[in-house]
Structure formats: structure tokens, C-alpha cells
Image: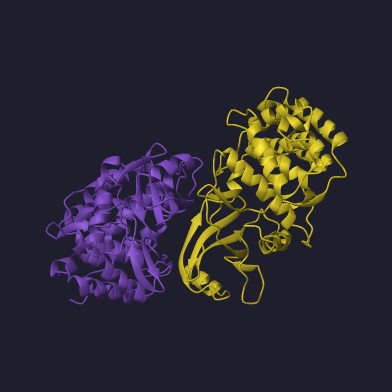
Chain colours: A purple, B yellow
Amino acid sequence: MAVYTEIPDAELIEYLKQYDIGELHSLKGIAEGVENSNYLLATDAGMHILTLYEKRVNVDDLPFFLGLMEHLAKNGLECPQPILLKTGEQLSKLAGRPSAIISYLDGNSVRRPSNSHCRQLGEALAQMHLAGEGFEIERPNALTVENWRPLYEMSGKGTNTVAEGLSKLIEDELTHLEENWPQDLKTGIIHADLFPDNVFFLKDKLSGIIDFYFACNDVLAYDIAICINAWCFEADHSFNVTKAQAMLKGYNSMREMSDDEVAALPVLCRGSALRFLLTRLYDWLNVPEGAMVTPKNPAEYIAKLKFHQSVNKASEYGASV
Amino acid sequence: MAVYTEIPDAELIEYLKQYDIGELHSLKGIAEGVENSNYLLATDAGMHILTLYEKRVNVDDLPFFLGLMEHLAKNGLECPQPILLKTGEQLSKLAGRPSAIISYLDGNSVRRPSNSHCRQLGEALAQMHLAGEGFEIERPNALTVENWRPLYEMSGKGTNTVAEGLSKLIEDELTHLEENWPQDLKTGIIHADLFPDNVFFLKDKLSGIIDFYFACNDVLAYDIAICINAWCFEADHSFNVTKAQAMLKGYNSMREMSDDEVAALPVLCRGSALRFLLTRLYDWLNVPEGAMVTPKNPAEYIAKLKFHQSVNKASEYGASV
């Protein structure tokens, strides 16, 4: 759950004068986003999201994130975009923090995606990959294969307290992935965190994608693997191939996957499962005192990783090659 | 800060079918209200507040709170009111909790009220006292003079760790108030928690009053005393008589205070300062583990109580008698 920085009303009223969105109607802190403080901001011009970037976000990355949202929206993707200041800038400062006003996206996330949700998600992911072309700022993925071993080492000795044999599982997997990670797949802008909470639907029709704060340049098909992990397993961690099939079909209808991308799916799914396993493991072992969130149990991603280890070829994900 | 119960989307979609407000657009947990989970709920019919009543609220009180909002709104007060189910009921159940959908009130609270805000607050408070007439359910004030001594005893020995001599200050004050509490003032529905966070302004015009979850039957002028404490002191705890004057003038323009009510203001202000001192003292000494809020420092109300002890007559508050 997010931090809520208190914004003095007099400061907010002055702040809004930098924009062309009229006067303040209301401001409500919302429980969305973990790294930032987010507020629903109503003005004469309607509803917006006001974001204060708290210390966990690197300020140098903000031009990438905000510029990307603008670029994607201009290229037809349904996603929030920064409202520009009268000066044309995207970024301002409020309550001592870097801040931006972002357009409001109607819709709500789904907790248990249906096949139709998965198909639409696939379409939107491909659209995002296409819309990202030509974006000029680059941001390397800080959570890809070469970062996983140092990340694992930060959890270190605590690992086996979470599950018996977990250290060995992870170490073997790291070795496997370091040796087999695909090198020549098409790269581009990936979302890198496209979980169901970050996709909105309005009356069962996908209305947009939010939260680009993990976006970066990496292998496009890795983003598909993240979505397979995030969307195509049931609550009991069983794999739902029908959902994966729907997702891949949706994706291919907008951007056809190459044979190499399809063939790499098993290793990319293993890598993506390990990536979320490692961050959840670290968070699980390092709950800050007085934390406002219960960390997510890493067990879910242990199960998913083991599933992918059992997969021999991409057709088992429903990919039609 | 509020608890956030997770509401499964499928359950929410079913839940909304009980109402005549169309289909779900979006639901966002908001950082408002301490006792309940509150969400901004957008549907085809626009914006609403969805409230889940968490365990700190007594379910038996809900017909009072919800019925009161409906009664006040019918009598012309600007305040949220429950959206009725198709069955005509106010209360339903969601995510295992009692729940209600309340109309959305536009506007924002002010942090540093101006004289004009104070005048408008006085008018709205009087309007509320008048609008409350004829409401048939009764709810005694659980935080009035006879409850303060037992409440103080719950803090007990920790008291002097907060400020030197605080026990003696409180004990002497309890004795004074128990002997001098006014008995024959006009009673009615009071808000009992009308702090600046619970009053919305839209472009500097008061747009409504929210949060009736402390409302009860008690001496009307006690509500005025609560507002003097909550609205008419500066951040350094100095008393701003111009604000109090504006507030009382606003109040009298809608409902004229009797001579007895005016004369009782000093003792009512002392009582109200002690009431907030005692709850803050208790919360300060009993921070639950993993609490999501920093409790409010009781020092503010020690200063306010001492100020009121120095007041000899109501004219020092700007009352014109």
C-alpha cells in the first residue's frame, strides 16, 4: 500500500495554476501503486491522477516513464498520459517531491481473468510493443538475467527457511538460465509488470494499461512470458492452457511472434518465474518494521517455476507452431 | 488511515445489481475515514462512496448513522446520503461486512481555515442542528462528561510520561467539569467530530459536511465548543478570536444561541478540549503494533484546555452578549 504524503490545500491550489485544468474540486489519496503516493484529483476539467514520486523511485527515470506514457498514448495505446504544464513540461514539484498529473483511465482491474480477458490482454500487450517503437529514451532492465544472482545473494541464508531445498532450486535454475538465456530475440519497450492489477476493463472490454514504472528495454517475448505467469495460472497454481492459448492468439493477431520467440517461451517463462520468485523472496525475508503491506508469499512462484521446468516445448503453452 | 478490505470484482458486480446505479466503471480504495474502508465507486450513474463497516463500528449504530444522513439531506443539509437498494433498504453486505453506498460530495477539506471558512462552518453547523430536528432514532453520546473519568483511568499511570503534571491537570479538570457541567441546555443531534477534515469547500464555498460516525444526541452548544477547538486555534495553539467571532456569527445567523448557551461556552470548551485530550492521550499510549497511523500528539489539547481554563466569560470567544 502506498505512502500518503499530506498535501496542504493552499499549496495544491497554487500548484494547479501551472496547468490548464481549472480549479480544484477534490483530492483523495488512493490505495494504488506501491512506490508512489497517488491521488484522485478532480478539477473543472474532470478527473485526473496526481502522483507524488516518493524516494523509492529514481528521479532520473521519470523522463523515461512520463515520456513513454505520452509516446504510447500518441501511438494509439489506451493508457494514462501526463497532463502538460503550461510550460509544456511533464514534471513539477509538490509537497517537496517530484510530481506529475496524469490523465484518468476509466475501468477496473479483474481479479480472476476469464479467457476473454486473457485474449484482450494479449492484444493490448502486442499493441504496446508496437506503440513503443520509435521511443527515444532507453532504460535497461534492472531485473533481468544478469541481475538475478546478486539479487538472490541478498536473500542468502534465509532462503531455505522459506521452503526446504529452495536454495538448490534457485542456484540450479540460475545456472540453467545464465547458460540458456536467449540472445538474439527482438527487443523493444516492455511493460515488465503487466499483472492483472495493471490492466483495466470497462464492462468486460479492456479499457487500458497502467503503471509503467517497471517499463524498460528488453526482449519483447519476455513480456509475454511475464503475462503467462501473471494471467494464466489458477489460484491453486495450476496452469490454464486455454487462457494461455487465448492470450497468445490475441497477441499474434496484433503482432505475429517469430518462430524464435515462440521457441524461447519455456526458458523465458522460467526466467520470469524466477525473477518474481527472487523479489518476493527478498521482500518476504525483509519486511520493514511497521510495514503497511503483507509481502506476497514466494510459494506461488516456486510452484510456477517448477511447472515451467517440466515444460518441453512452447506448444505446451498453447502456442501454435 | 483506513483498512482496505479487498473486494473481489465478481462479487462487486453482483452486489451492484441490488442498486439502480448501473454497471461498474471503477473502484478505488481511498485514504479517508479511520474506522471504515472507503472506496470511490464510479458507475454508469456517476461517482459514489462505497463504505465497508469494519469491526470498530458497532453494527447496531448503523441505522442511526445512515438514517441520520438521509434525514439531514431531506431537510436541506448538504451532506452525503445513502443510496437505497432496490428493496428500499440502506444497508447491505459485501466482502463479509456490512456495507452501504453513499452519494458523492464534491469539494475538498481545508487545512488552514480562513475567517470566511469559519463563518460558513458556523452557518452549516447551525443548519445541521436545525435539520436534525424530528429525527426519531436516538444515540447517546458515549464520550461526554460521565465517560471521561473512566476513559482517563484507562490511560492511568502512563499519563505523566506524556507531560509533567498531566495527571493532576486532568484530575482537577474532571472534578471541575463534573461539578459544573450544564444540565438544562437544549439538546438535539450533534455531529461531535466536526473537524476541518469533515467539511468540504468547493472554490471557497462550503459544499457539505461528511462523516457522521460520531453523531449522537447531546447539548447542541457542545458541538459549537468542539468547533471552537477544532477551527479557531492557530498551528502554534494560539487562539484566534476573529475566527471564533466569525464562526459564532455564522451560527447565530441560522440559529440564534440562547443566553444560557452563550454563558456555558467556557465550560463547554473546557469539556470538549478534555474529551479530545483524553482520547488522544489513550491512543498515544496505546499504539497498536504495526499501526498504519501516527497517533496525534495530545499536547495540542493540553494547550487548548489551559487556554480555556484562563477564560472568564463567553465574550472572550467573541460571543456578542
Residue B313 in which image quadrant? top right
Residue B295 in which image quadrant? top right
Where's residue A126, x and y in %? 23, 67
B261 in relation to A233, above or below: above
The foreground one among B98 and B142 is B142
**Can you see residue A221?**
no
User: Residue placed farthest to the left in the image?
Assistant: A184
**Can you see residue A116?**
yes
Where's residue A258, x and y in %? 14, 69
Where's residue A121, x and y in %? 31, 69
The foreground one among B161 and B106 is B106
B255 sits to left or right of B109: right
Work out which quarter of the rendered image holds the C terminus of chain B and state it. top right
The foreground one among B175 and B200 is B200
A121 sits to left or right of B78: left
Residue occupying image coordinates x 63% and y 69% = B92
Where's residue B38, x and y in %? 55, 57
Residue occupying image coordinates x 24% and y 71% = A251
B81 in relation to B295, above or below: below
